[in-house]
Image (spheres, grey):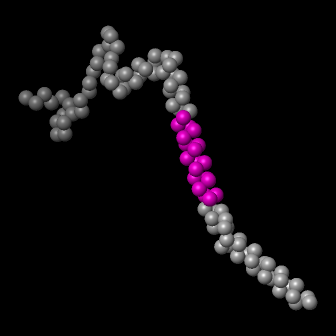
Amino acid sequence: MFHWIILLLLICLIGLQYRLWFGEANLGEVQALQQEIERQRAENDLLVNRNHQLDAEVKDLKQGLEALEERARNQLGMVKEGESFFQLVPALPGRSPTDTGQ
């Protein structure tokens, strides 16, 4: 009688171990899903930071002209009335900056 109980418990243990390692939602699958969750959380954190930056930029553009002016200067090359624009051209290789080419 005692042998039958041990045999029955052993069969139950083997069945449960099979489900744990090879059945639906096994340990490998659970670990892969946890890694995917961590990757998605990291991506979400990056996107949240980007959204905060964009939100701050939108508020700045709505409220102040400084950001708009900075964009106009940097991206469009615009200057204010009364300002002088100077463009610095790098020297050609083999020429000194004081060489006039004569």
Q: What is the x, y in percent for residue 61?
A: 48, 21
The one of 99 and 76 positioned closer to us in this rendering: 76
Q: Which residues are magenta?
A: 33-51
Residue at the farthest right position? 1
Q: Quadrant of the N terminus?
A: bottom right
Residue at the farthest top position? 82
Task: Look at the image and say whether residue 47 sits in the magenta stretch.
Answer: yes
Q: Quadrant of the C terminus?
A: top left
Q: What is the x, y in percent for residue 8?
A: 83, 83
Most common secondary structure along the magenta stretch = helix
| Residue at 55% across, 42% down | 46
Is 59 placed above or below 36 here?
Answer: above
Is 12 placed above or below 67 here?
Answer: below
Q: Is residue 86 left or right of residue 19?
A: left
Q: Is residue 44 left or right of residue 75?
A: right
The one of 25 and 72 positioned closer to us in this rendering: 25
Q: Give the number of callouts.
A: 0
Task: Look at the image and say whether residue 27 sits in the magenta stretch.
Answer: no
Q: What is the x, y in percent for residue 45?
A: 58, 43
Q: What is the x, y in percent for residue 40?
A: 58, 50
The one of 69 and 102 positioned closer to us in this rendering: 69
Is 81 placed above or below 42 here?
Answer: above
| The quarter of the displayed image where residue 79 is located | top left
| Residue at 50% across, 27% down | 57
| The quarter of the displayed image where residue 72 is located | top left
Q: Is residue 3 left or right of residue 13?
A: right
